[in-house]
Amino acid sequence: MGDLARLDAVFAKARRGEPIVVAALGGFITAGGERTKDPANRYISQVSKWFQEKFPNSKVTFVNAGIGSTNSGYGALRVQRDVLSKNPDFVIVEYAVNDWFAGFLLDDSYEGVLRQILSNPKQPAVMELFFNHPDGNSAQKEQVRLGNYYGLPMVSFRDVIPPPDLNAVPSPLNKSYPAD
C-alpha cells in the first residue's frame, strides 16, 4: 500500500475545490502506446476522468510527460523540466516495461526520478505504476524494492490481470503452439 499521507493531502485539497495538478511520467504506455492510439483509452485519460468525476469543483490540470521509447535514464534527466516545473500535486511514475528492456540496469536512474520528485519543496504525492510486456516481463520487482524503501503507493497491472499463458494461446510473440 505505501504511505498514503501525501495522496490524502491531494484528495483533501481537491475536496476543498482548490486546483490540483496531476502528472504522469513514463515511456510509451504513458505517452500512448500503439494499443492506446485513442487518447480516451490511455491510463492517464482514465485517471483524468476519475479526478474530474470525483472532484467536480476542483480545477484539475493534467500533465502527460510520457515519451515513447524512453526509460528512467532519460526520465531522470527531464523530470525537473517536464514534471516538477508544472508544480504537480500528484505524480504517477511508469517505467516498468521500458526499464525492463534496458536489462535492469536502471535502478539508480529510477531512484533518481523518485528522489527528485519526493525532495521537491511542494512534496507531491508519488505513486508507482507497473505495466508489463505482453510476455509478462517488467522491472516491477526492482522498482517495488525502491517503492517499499520510500513507502510509496504502488499499483500493478500484472498483479491484477496476470499475463496469459503464452504457450496456450497462439500469439505472434510465441511461435510454440500447443499440440492439437
Image (tube, rainbow, N blue to C red):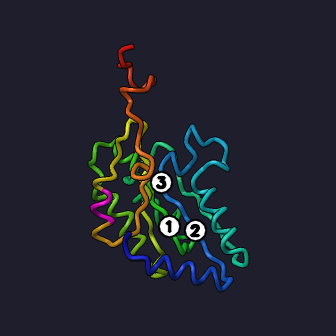
Instruction: Please tell me how crowded label 2 is: few (under 14), some (14-19), or many (20+) other residues with Cα within 10 Å.
Output: many
Residue 107, given in percent of the width and then of the height, sits at 28, 56
Instruction: Please tell me how crowded label 3 is: few (under 14), some (14-19), or many (20+) other residues with Cα within 10 Å.
Output: many
Residue 26 bears which disc, if any? 3
Residue 91 bears which disc, if any? 1
Main secondary structure type of the part rendered in magenta = helix
Which one is nearer the viewer's eye here, 162 or 108? 162
Which one is nearer the viewer's eye here, 36 or 104? 36
Q: Confirm or deny contact between disc 2 and disc 1 (CB under 8 A).
A: yes
Residue 87 falls left or right of residue 15: left
Instruction: Please tell me how crowded label 1 is: few (under 14), some (14-19), or many (20+) other residues with Cα within 10 Å.
Output: many
Q: Amino acid at mark 1?
A: Val
Q: Secondary structure at mark 3?
A: strand
Nearer-N-terminus badge (1/3): 3
The relative height of residue 47 versus residue 73 in the rendered view (above or below) is: below
Q: Secondary structure at mark 1?
A: strand
Residue 142, given in percent of the width and then of the height, sits at 28, 55
In the current view of this chain or complex, which residue is farthest to the top? Answer: 180
Nearer-N-terminus badge (2/1): 2
Q: Amino acid at mark 2?
A: Val
Residue 17 bears which disc, if any? none
Instruction: Name the residue rendered at 67%, 62% in the picture.
Output: 49
In the current view of this chain or complex, which residue is farthest to the bottom? Answer: 16
Q: Confirm or deny contact between disc 3 and disc 2 (CB under 8 A).
A: no
The relative height of residue 156 versus residue 169 in the rendered view (above or below) is: below
Residue 22 bears which disc, if any? 2
Magenta residue span? 143-147
Q: Amino acid at mark 3?
A: Gly
